[in-house]
Each structure stands twice: as structure tokens, then as C-alpha cells.
Image: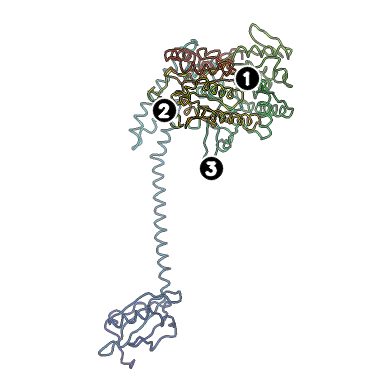
Amino acid sequence: MDPSKLRITKASRRYPVPILSCRGRLAGVGIVDNNGKFIATSESLSNGIKQSSQANQTITDAMDGDQDEGNFVTVDGNKYYVYASPLQDKKSVVGALIVVQNAGYIDSELTGIWTSVLSKLFIQAFLLSIAILIILRWIIFLPLRNFVESLQYTRQGNKKKTISKVFDNPFLGPLMKEVGNIQQNLIEARIAASEEARLRLKKFDSPWTTERLKAFVTDILKDRKIFVVSNREPYVHTKEGNTIEYHFPASGMVTAIEPIMQATGGMWIAYGGGNADKLVVNQNDTIGVPPDNPFYTLKRVWLTKEEVTGFYDGFSNEGLWPLCHIAHMRPVFKKDDWREYVKVNEKFAKTVLKEIKNEHNPFFFVLYFNFALLPHFIKEKRPDATVGIFWHIPWPNAESFSICPWKKEILEGMLGADIIGFHTQLHCNNFINTVSRELEALIDLEQFTVTKNNHRTSVKPFPISIAFSKRSSVSLAEQETQSKEALKKLGVKTEYVGIGVDRLDYTKGILERLRAIEIFLTKYPAYIEKFTFIQISAPSRTDIAEYKNFTVKVEEEVSRINNKLRKNSWKPILFLHKHHSHEAIYPLYRAANVCLVTSLHDGMNLVAKEFVAARDDEKGVLILSQFAGASRELRDALIVNPYNGEQTAEAIHTALTMRRSEQTKRMHRMREILKSYNVYRWSAEFLKTMIELG
């Protein structure tokens, strides 16, 4: 073939090779004959391209079809574009012109183009999102936040903020206007209720409510602020994984005081023992509580491990607790524990004094036996403060208390208060006798006062109660449904159900109760497979050896009795060793035929009152220890000596066979007692006495 005779086809002339103009990207050119053999190439054309099957196929297709062909090929990891244009003599295709271009830049440029496009789209989307968020914030979010805050203020009885400012919102205005009308009606209703409450202030026998207590406190305290000091806090925050939750501790005293603080506001100062307590407080170690709907302030005090061990586990719970309960557990008194007890009382005193620095005539409520020294520490620095201490556990006889090595210091610390409250008159008598035996002081038995160092302290009984309301907002039918669901969830299917709710503490008579149940089922085998006893026991003082040992004993006793009496899938005792909320316990109270409170020695025991309060249906029977303070009030319960297992077993049988009419008569009378003397009245009487004495 004579190359001089070759000519470019018409097609090639019509469509000139576009990539020849792309300088710097040309990988080479060549001419092949009609057999596909290269007869002329540029020096830059690589052998790999010449030998590429993809390139040769493109050349063959161009010559066979007598038209230009192009294709991308990969050679040695590099990407090329091969363009073949057929060459003709006068009659036929005799070869092809090959142009090869580096094509790697195409992917790079495409990536760049997509990156540029996506970046612009992202920027536009981001700017659009910002604009939408700004619009949502000013038109929807801020009005809704004000709306929610306003409703919270209204629910709390605070008229400080209303939702009238957001009525002009174009989207939410109509809805908020309607809710605003409801809010205004609620405010007016509360004002009317408060006014009615003020009119009843002097009639202590009429029903006490949250509104009445608020009015009462406002009337007698004026601008004085209430401070409550205790070791146990009303809300404990714990963290599991990345989730922070809170729970209400298993404490009768906290159960009683918390509604008062919600009614009156103020500050509660307590030890922060939850593993997430520090994560939720502000820089002043305070937090609004209840967490979901704050009514008052909780200030947490931090204690070291050594302080907790000595102050709480040691002197308080291994010393004072068994000493005061006389539950056949020998008290342990260690000098190091006493030092920590004094140290922690001083730490709380410093915290208290700091908080009341700018308060005029502050008002203090000291709870628990953990702070026997605190009244003296406060009164010494702030004699203008009114201080009351409520000793919520029993006070033993003078001879029993005399074994305490630091008895004088404890008594002098308590006598720093203006008033010392106990659950029963018996405990007051024991305290007066103890002071008479241990201290040089002027005692007035007619007024029940102690005067020492020119300071007079009154000693009075205040049997604590609960926030009882005569009728639940839940209908009896709904209560019954909830109770059935609660039993079903626990797998309880028996005809008769008993319940016990206690901290896992040796003073609660749990072991004696379990043995009484064993005696009952042995003596009355007809109840086997028909009776289940649910024992709910929240963990308590788990770092103390005696409590660990007691837990093991209870678990072993439950296992022994269940193994002895088990039949088919039934077992007599269901032991629930964990915290339960009031919401979880109340359906079980309502489901139970009998509730056992068998304390070996107790200040009051609010479980007995909670069971009665839960029985809107006026059914069920309460079996109550004669050594619990509640037995002085709830005389229609079946009163037993918890040490007498036979007597308690007979009481269980009496309860399960008692006629409905008898149950109703007894329960009605006990509910009337709680109705007339609830925790709001207890608080009002204690506060009123403090004001009169302060």
C-alpha cells in the first residue's frame, strides 16, 4: 500500500478529530493497514496500546463499518481514549488513522465538578436550614417555650407569668388564647380556694389540703423562708450507661415531708449520694425539684467516703439506730465514728449558715437522728433562727440510752432546738426522763419543756401522717383493672393476696412475718395454692455488715419456706428485692386482701397509713404491730405482737375470713382518721408550735 495514495474519508473530513486540539493530553498517533498492523506511529505511542485488544477492536470496528469509532481503554492501569478514523483509496478502506489521548483527567474533572456542585448544594441547604431554624425559633419555639413556662407557673400557683404576650402569634395565637382563658379561670379558682383556706385557718379540725397549708404558711411565716435539713435527699439521680434517671428513696420521713415542701417551697439541704447527683446540679450545688415540675430547691452537700462510713454507716446506723429501736441488736460505738458524726454535723451547719447569711429570722426543720448536734450549732451562731427537730425514730427508755458514750453531747445538741418532736407521747416521756437522768437542767413536766443555759426547749408529740385525699381521681373500676394487671405482671393468680412493704431492715420484723405466714399455711392448709404473700423490700444500708447478713437471712428464709410449701407452680412468698415507686405499689395495695406491718419497734410506720389511704373501696384488712406508732391511731387494725408467730398467723386467718361489712366498717373509721389528720395538718401543727415558741 502506498501511503501517498491514502485519503481521509468524507466522514473524517466532515467530523474532524476533536481531541487533536487538546494539547498536553495526546498520548500518540498511528496508521494501521487493513490487516490491523501498525505501519506508522508517533514515538509517544506505547506498545501497550498497540497490543491492547480493546484498542484493536475499536480499529477493526472503524474499518469494518467505514465510520469513525472511539472507545475508552485501560492499559497498564492508565485510562486512554482511542479514536479510529478509516482511510480509503479510490475504491475501499485500506487502513485507519489512530489518535490516542490520555483520559485520566476526565474522572478527576468529573469528581471536581460533582464536588463543586455538592458543595454548593450543601451551602444552600445549610443557609436554608439556618433560615428555617430562625423562623421556627421566633415564630414557633419561643412562643411555645413561653407557653409551657406559663402553664408551669400556673400549675405551681405562681401568677408571675401569663401567656397573653403570645396571643398575637399568627400560627399559635388562637390556640393560646383559648388556653389563656382556661389558665385565667384556674388562677381565679386558686385565688378563691386560697381565700376559702384563709377563712378556715383557725379551724384545725376541718380538712387540710395543699392550698390550705400554703395559705397557712403564708399567714404565719410572712416572708420567712423554710429550710429542711436531712441526710436522705428527696430525689436521687443515678446514671446507667448514658442515661440519667431519678427515683424517690424508700423513706417514710421523705414520703411525709416532700408534699410539704411542694406546698410551701423553700430549700431542702441533704447529702447527695446518687452517682449522677453532681452531674445535674448547678454551680451552687442546687437543683429544682421535682425534676419534671420544680416547686422547691434541693441543695446537695457532698461527703467523702470516710465521712459516710463513719457518720452514716457507723455512728448513725450501727450506734444510734439499734440503740433507739431496742430490736435486740447490740449497738456499736466507735470513737472514730463519733468524730465523723461531729464533723459531718459541723459541715452541714456551715452549709446552712452560709445559705441563711442574708435571711432574717430563718425557719429550720431538722430531720433524722443523723443531725442531733445540728440544732445547737445553728442556734449558737444564729440565735434569731427558729429551729425544730423531728426525731422520727423511737426514743428509748433512759436506762437503755445511758449506754451511749456521748449521750450528754447528743442531748445538749438536740436541746439547741426550740422544739423537739416525737411520734408518740411515750417517746416524749422517755426523752424527758433521759434528760433528767443525764443533764443538769430545769424540767417543767406540766408544760413538757427543758430549760438549759437560759434556752427553753419544748418536747411534744406529733404523730406524722401522709398526704391523704378522701377519694382518688381514678375510678374504682379503673383501680380494679390496674390491680389485676399488676398481679398478672408478677404472675400472681391466687384468690387471696397479702402484701408487706418495707426497707430491708431488721427492725421491720420481716423474718417474724415470714415465719407467721409459714405457721398460717401449716395450720390452715386449705389456703395452699390459694394465698400468695408479696414482700416488697427496697435495699437499705447495703454497706453495713449487719444489713448484708440480714438480707441473706431473709432470702434464705423465703427460699426455705417456698421449698417446704411449694406445690405445682405455686409458691407462697414472692420476694421483690428492689426499689418500687408509689405508682407501682398502690395497685398492689388495692389488690391485697391483707397488709402486714410487723415492726419490732417503729416510730410511726407510714406503710400502714399508705395501705389504708389506697383502699378507696374500703376493703382489705390491716395487721399492725403493737410496737409501731401507728397502732396508737389505727385501732381498727388487727393489732398483734410480732414476736408471737401464732398470734400473727391467727390474725391472717381472721383477716381472710372477715365479712365484707366488717372490713368496710373498720377501713372507713381508719380512713376518717387519716382524712382528719393528714401530713398537711401535721406540718401546720408543727410549724404553728414552732412559731409560737420561736
* Residue 297 visible at all: no
On residue 385, which mark appears? 1
Q: Which amino acid is tagged 1?
A: Ala
Residue 674: give x, y in percent of width and height. 49, 15
On residue 642, which mark appears? none
* Quarter of the picture holding the N terminus: bottom left
Tell me, what colour scheme is on the image? rainbow
Of circles 1 and 3, the one toward us is 3
> In the figure, is residue 385 to the left or right of 259?
right
Q: Which amino acid is tagged 2?
A: Lys
Location of mark 3 (residue): 241
> In the figure, is residue 428 to the left or right of 569?
right
Residue 240: give x, y in percent of width and height. 54, 40
Q: Is residue 350 above or below residue 245?
A: above
Q: Nearer the viewer, residue 497 or 118?
A: 497
Describe the element under mark 1 as helix, strand or loop: loop
Residue 396: give x, y in percent of width and height. 66, 16
* Among the two numbered marks 2 and 1 on one chain, the one whose residue lies closer to the N terminus: 1
* Among the two numbered marks 2 and 3 on one chain, the one whose residue lies closer to the N terminus: 3
* Residue 398 visible at all: yes
* Among the two numbered marks 1 and 3 on one chain, the one whose residue lies closer to the N terminus: 3
